[in-house]
C-alpha cells in the first residue's frame, strides 16, 4: 500500500494470512470466559465425555495489591492537587509512580492472557478440536458487582477479559482453528433444566435431581449436548 506522509510517498506493508479452517475431529475445546476475578475455565470433550477440565486465572493477589497501591498514591496526588502542589517535585514523582503502577497492572494481565491463549490454541491444534467459546461479559459484570469489587478494578477485569477474547479469536483465525460462540448456561441444571442453587465456593447444586458441579464446570456439561 502506497500513501503520502508530509507530502513524501511511503510504502506500508500489511501482513495477511489466509488459512482454511481444518475439519474438526471428535474433540471439542470448550472455553468458558468470565471476568478475570473468576478466570477462564476450559474443558476438553471427546465423544460426549469430559476428558479434562481446568479453571485458569491470574494471580489476583498481585494485581489487587498493585491496584490498592495505585489508589493510595492517587489519593496523595489528589491532596497535593487540591493545594496546587501537584507540579512540585513531589507531585511529579507521585504522578510518575502512579503511571508506573498502572502499567504493571495491565502488563501482568496482558502477559497472562497471551500465555493462556497460546496454550489453548496449541491444545486445539494438537487435537484438531472445534473450539466453543462462551463469552458472557454482561453476566461477568453482574458477578463482579455482587462480589463488591471497587468500580475501577471491575473495569480493569472486564476490559482485559474483552482483550483476551479478541486475542483468542485472532490466534484461532491465524492458525485456521474452527470456532463457534455458544451460550452455555452455568445456573441451569444440564440434566433436568431446573435452576441451580449456588453454594459457598461457587459450587452449583440442583435441588430437583441432585446434580452438583463447580459453577465453571457446568457449561462443559451443556457443551456435551451440542
Image (cartoon, helix red, strand yellow):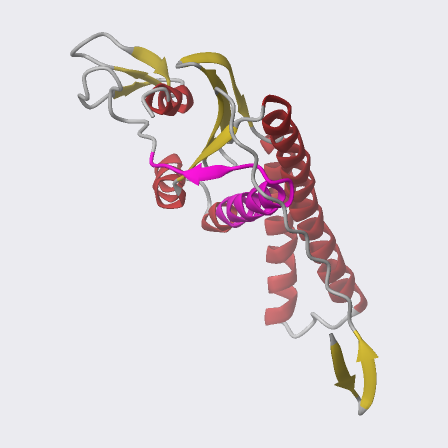
* Observer able to see residue 226: yes
x, y percent for residue 165: 53, 44
Q: Which residue appears farthest toward the top when viewing the image?
A: 210
The answer to whether 86 appears left or right of 218 in the picture is right
Residue at position x 40%, y 44% in the image: 137
Task: Name above or below for residue 37 compared with residue 166.
Answer: above
Front in this rendered view, residue 91 or 116 = 116
x, y percent for residue 65: 63, 37
Image quadrant where residue 66 sits: top right
Image quadrant where residue 216 sits: top left
Work out which quarter of the rendered image holds the N terminus and state it. Answer: bottom right
Q: Main secondary structure of the magenta part?
A: helix
Residue at position x 55%, y 45% in the image: 169
The answer to whether 176 appears left or right of 189 in the picture is right
Q: Is residue 161 magenta?
A: yes
Q: Which residue appears farthest toward the bottom when viewing the image?
A: 7
Residue at position x 58%, y 26% in the image: 128
Front in this rendered view, residue 27 or 184 = 27
The span shown in magenta is 156-183
Task: Name above or below for residue 87 compared with residue 9.
Answer: above
Image quadrant where residue 173 sits: top right
Work out which quarter of the rendered image holds the C terminus and state it. Answer: top left
The answer to whether 176 appears left or right of 50 in the picture is right
Q: Is residue 193 magenta?
A: no
User: How many numbered marks, from 0 up?
Assistant: 0
Residue at position x 74%, y 82% in the image: 3
* Observer able to see residue 35: no
Front in this rendered view, residue 132 or 129 = 129
The answer to whether 48 appears left or right of 81 in the picture is left
Front in this rendered view, residue 177 or 167 = 177
x, y percent for residue 64: 59, 38
x, y percent for residue 55: 52, 22
Amino acid at each position: 500500500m502506497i500513501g503520502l506522509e508530509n507530502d513524501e510517498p511511503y510504502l506500508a506493508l500489511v501482513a495477511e494470512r489466509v488459512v482454511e479452517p481444518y475439519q474438526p475431529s471428535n474433540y471439542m475445546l470448550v472455553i468458558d470466559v468470565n471476568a478475570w476475578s473468576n478466570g477462564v475455565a476450559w474443558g476438553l470433550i471427546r465423544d460426549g465425555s469430559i476428558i479434562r477440565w481446568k479453571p485458569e486465572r491470574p494471580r489476583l493477589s498481585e494485581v489487587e495489591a498493585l491496584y490498592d497501591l495505585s489508589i493510595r498514591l492517587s489519593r496523595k496526588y489528589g491532596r497535593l492537587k487540591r493545594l496546587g502542589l501537584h507540579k512540585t517535585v513531589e507531585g511529579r514523582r507521585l504522578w510518575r509512580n502512579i503511571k508506573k503502577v498502572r502499567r504493571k497492572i495491565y502488563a501482568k494481565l496482558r502477559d497472562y492472557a497471551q500465555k493462556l491463549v497460546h496454550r489453548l490454541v496449541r491444545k486445539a491444534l494438537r487435537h484438531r478440536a472445534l473450539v466453543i467459546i462462551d463469552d458472557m461479559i454482561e453476566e461477568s459484570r453482574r458477578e463482579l458487582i455482587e462480589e463488591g469489587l471497587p468500580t475501577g478494578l471491575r473495569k480493569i477485569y472486564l476490559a482485559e477479559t474483552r482483550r483476551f477474547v479478541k486475542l483468542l479469536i485472532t490466534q484461532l483465525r491465524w492458525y485456521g482453528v474452527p470456532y463457534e460462540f455458544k451460550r452455555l448456561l452455568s445456573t441451569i441444571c444440564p440434566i433436568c433444566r431446573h435452576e441451580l442453587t449456588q453454594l459457598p465456593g461457587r459450587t452449583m447444586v440442583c435441588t430437583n435431581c441432585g446434580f452438583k458441579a463447580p459453577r465453571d464446570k457446568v457449561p462443559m456439561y451443556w457443551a456435551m449436548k451440542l
